């Protein structure tokens, strides 16, 4: 069995919430040893965010925390204390990278500036994730997922044209910032080792969102066209989401697939002069839309999906969460892995979407709060007596 690409790499995870944790989850998925630094007593705020089994809050049973932190090591440490700062300085000597999502200037304000840390470890990488970046007039502004999603332009494009903009499900702005940070960190770790120089990566959640507007922003910049206008679930009669008899289906039929689509949806579409070519279908979009709605409402979504695949027509059914768990395809690929946790019990975890031949990802459980504090501190030479004194002072 081969090693994962990041085996032997140690990463310090600082901060709270989703973005840094998701970045480090992916780094851990591909082999890195992630040391998660949490506040003594309370730990990462995601331990309190849930959801929880039976809707009963418990710091070791948050589904969000369990997902984001599988396989990491947790230490508790007050990094604002003198002892805590000294521990960070010593841990840096053992690490290749730091990933943090504190407000700009926070680490420098508590006497842990990157310049000093890099002097201790010249090849050190630090990836910083913030709502608006380290510089600029908004850099000190606070934001949550909704603010990042709105400020990056995605919300302008989401929803019905005659309604208010919509926030899509989940914490996508935070996850996208974490995903960008993961990619940047992988490149940065390679660059620091190859060029033998440390690097500080500045990740702006707003900019991550703005770079993912597909063709909308480039078209608007280059041509002055408002391609980002909200279009709801139907871009046109042959591109959108439609209610089926037992759920919803997605259709994206281009000109080459039109003849095959009419065989599937009914010969009356092919024989109707209003729909004889692409231009005619655009002119008569409302009439065609009504017919597609009526046809889709009679269809079983899964049967239609497989028949459309057989005919090479891009039609799919909208998967519910139960559909994902029951998917014969995902289960055949062992996408879900059962993980046993000492407090939360057994739960399924989705594997990452990228796989390496002969190097399968195997999840361990998310750590208990401070589970690895003594082990990690002992590894950097902190004695049991020193740890006891720090524990008495609330440092760990």
Image (spheres, rainbow, N blue to C red):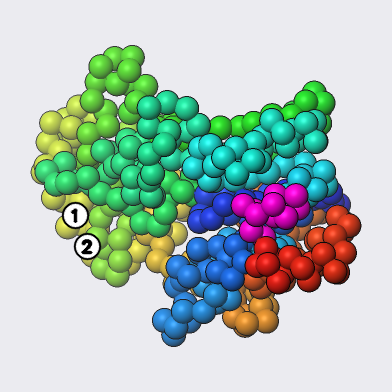
What is the spatial separation of the Cα atoms under label 2 and label 1, in whole angstroms?
6 Å
Q: Is residue 196 above or below residue 12?
A: above
Check residue 340 for magenta coloring: no
Q: Position of residue 157 (x, y in %)?
A: 27, 38
Residue drawn at 33 percent across, 45 percent down: 147
Say whether residue 363 is left or right of residue 150: right
Q: Tell me the quarter of the picture where residue 374 sits.
A: bottom right
Residue closest to the far top: 222
Contact between marks 2 and 1 (CB within 8 A): the answer is yes
Task: Name the image quarter holding the C terminus.
Answer: bottom right
Q: Position of residue 298 (x, y in %)?
A: 23, 65
Q: Tell me the quarter of the picture where residue 363 sits.
A: bottom right
- Region in magenta: 77-87
Q: Which residue is mark 2?
A: 297
Q: Is residue 267 visible?
A: no
Residue drawn at 50 percent across, 56 percent down: 17
Asked whether 328 or 182 is in front, the reply is 182
Element type at mark 1: helix
Crowd class of label 2 (few under 14; some 14 to 19; many from 20; radius 10 Å): some
Q: Position of residue 324 (x, y in %)?
A: 49, 66
Question: Which mark is on residue 261?
Answer: none
């Amino acid at each position: 069995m081969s090693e994962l690409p990041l085996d032997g790499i140690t990463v310090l995870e600082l901060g709270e919430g989703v973005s840094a944790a998701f970045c480090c989850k992916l780094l851990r998925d591909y082999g890195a040893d992630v040391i998660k630094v949490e506040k003594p007593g309370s730990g990462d705020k995601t331990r309190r965010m849930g959801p929880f089994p039976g809707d009963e809050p418990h710091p070791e049973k948050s589904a969000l925390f369990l997902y984001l932190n599988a396989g990491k090591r947790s230490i508790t440490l007050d990094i604002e204390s003198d002892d805590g700062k000294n521990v960070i300085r010593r841990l840096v000597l053992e690490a290749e990278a730091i990933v943090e999502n504190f407000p700009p200037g926070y680490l420098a304000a508590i006497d842990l500036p990157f310049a000093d840390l890099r002097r201790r470890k010249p090849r050190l990488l630090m990836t910083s994730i913030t709502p608006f970046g380290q510089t600029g007039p908004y850099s000190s502004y606070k934001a949550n997922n909704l603010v990042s999603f709105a400020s990056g332009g995605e919300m302008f494009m989401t929803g019905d044209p005659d309604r208010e903009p919509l926030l899509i499900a989940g914490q996508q702005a935070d996850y996208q910032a974490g995903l960008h940070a993961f990619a940047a960190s992988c490149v940065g770790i390679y660059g620091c080792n190859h060029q033998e120089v440390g690097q500080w990566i500045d990740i702006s959640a707003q900019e991550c969102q703005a770079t993912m507007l597909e063709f909308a922003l480039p078209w608007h910049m280059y041509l002055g066209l408002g391609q980002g206008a909200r279009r709801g679930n139907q871009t046109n009669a042959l591109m959108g989401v439609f209610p089926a008899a037992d759920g919803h289906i997605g259709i994206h039929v281009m000109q080459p697939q039109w003849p095959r689509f009419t065989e599937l949806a009914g010969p009356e579409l092919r024989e109707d002069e209003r729909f004889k070519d692409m231009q005619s279908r655009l002119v008569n979009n409302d009439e065609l839309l009504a017919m597609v709605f009526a046809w889709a409402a009679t269809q079983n979504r899964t049967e239609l999906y497989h028949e459309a695949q057989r005919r090479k027509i891009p039609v799919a059914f909208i998967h519910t969460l139960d559909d994902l768990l029951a998917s014969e395809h995902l289960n055949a690929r062992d996408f879900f892995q059962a993980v046993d946790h000492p407090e939360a019990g057994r739960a399924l975890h989705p594997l990452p979407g990228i796989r390496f031949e002969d190097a399968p990802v195997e999840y361990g459980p998310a750590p208990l709060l401070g589970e690895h504090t003594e082990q990690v501190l002992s590894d950097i030479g902190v004695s049991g007596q020193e740890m006891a004194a720090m524990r008495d002072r609330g440092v760990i």
